[in-house]
Image: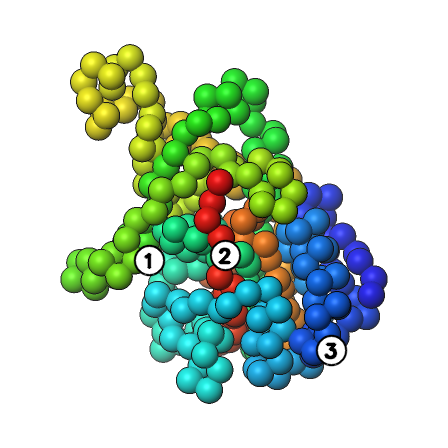
Amino acid sequence: MQVHPVTCAIGAELRHVSLAEASRDAGLAAEIRALLVQHKVLFFRQQELTRAEHVTFARHFGELEDHPVVGSDPEHPGLVRIYKNPETPVDRYENSWHTDATWREKPPFGCVLRCVECPPVGGDTMWANMVLAFEKLPAHIQQQIAGLRARHSIEATFGAAMPTEKRLALKAQYPDAEHPVVRTHPDTGEKILFVNGFTTHFTNFHTPANVRYGQDYQPGAAMLLAYLVSQVQIPEYQVRWRWQPGDVAMWDNRSTQHYAVMDYPPCHRKMERAGIVGEAVF
Ligand code: AKG
């Protein structure tokens, strides 16, 4: 196996490795896991991987989880089909920066995404390194956000694109979660800037003004949150992958955000993903 970093900030392509083989080899899967934690997103070009092998490979890292909106392959539970074609209305499920499912108490560990079919150009996916995003914040902002907590809601992205009734049903099924704004990576101890498109507001932002007028009065809080959420857009923290059919990307969902670029309609794009259950956030 050869490791080729794709940018200075995030991402490595692993060459001369077969994920079909890794699906049957726990030792190889453990090596891949260590590289994942180090590089945050791994790329594997043109893999010959069946759906069953895709699921088995992902299961080395944990249970697979359901998707709130997109259905699983009935023959391969946990394998979620993200198929876009001229008949699929353009939605905003993937083309906004997000860390997967931070509205869960235990957001996913990571995801294994395989490209089945891609447009001739366009349809890239981008990832950003949220450890670097934290490291590069000015020291006084790092201090200010050290003990802050924030609410994450499915309504903030998925829900916003839906009719009210469907949105409320979704929220009843997947209630909001609260997490620290600065998360600690459970494997490395690194600090991670842990706000994204699902984050709605801080829950313990105290200033003299809101101590006097109540917790809902948070002048400055929305601006601070918008500033933190915008950090993901800095190109030096990012990697962008140009897909070919058979490519696989695997990301550490704890330390990254991603964005699927929606520039290809009316072309087809077919992706299959296996999201892996994660742990509580500290
Ligand atoms: C996701 O699987 O969470 C996505 O955002 C989709 C990524 C992609 O289709 O490139």
- Label 1–label 2 contact, CB within 8 A: no
The local secondary structure at tag 1 comes to: loop
Task: Tell me which residue sits at (42%, 84%) in the image.
Answer: 74
**Residue indicated by mark 1:** 158
Q: Is mark 1 within 8 Å of ligand 1?
A: no
Q: Residue at x 57, y 82 (%)?
A: 51
| Residue type indicated by callout 1 | Phe
Which of marks 1 and 3 precedes in the sequence?
A: 3
The residue where tag 3 is placed is 21
Using the rendered view, name the quadrant where residue 110 is placed: bottom right
- What type is the residue that disc 3 sits on? Glu
* Separation of residues labelled 1 and 2 (CA atoms): 20 Å
**Of the residues under marks 3 and 2, which one precedes in the sequence?**
3
The secondary element bearing badge 3 is classed as: helix
Residue 113, above or below 86: above
Mark 1 or 2: in front is: 2
Give the residue displayed 60% in from the left and 77% down from the top.
56
- Residue under label 2, please give it: 278
- Nearest the eye: 173 or 139: 173
Instruction: Locate residue 280, reporting x and y percent.
Output: 46, 49
Q: Nearer the viewer, mark 3 or mark 2?
A: 2
User: Hey, what amino acid is under mark 2?
Assistant: Gly
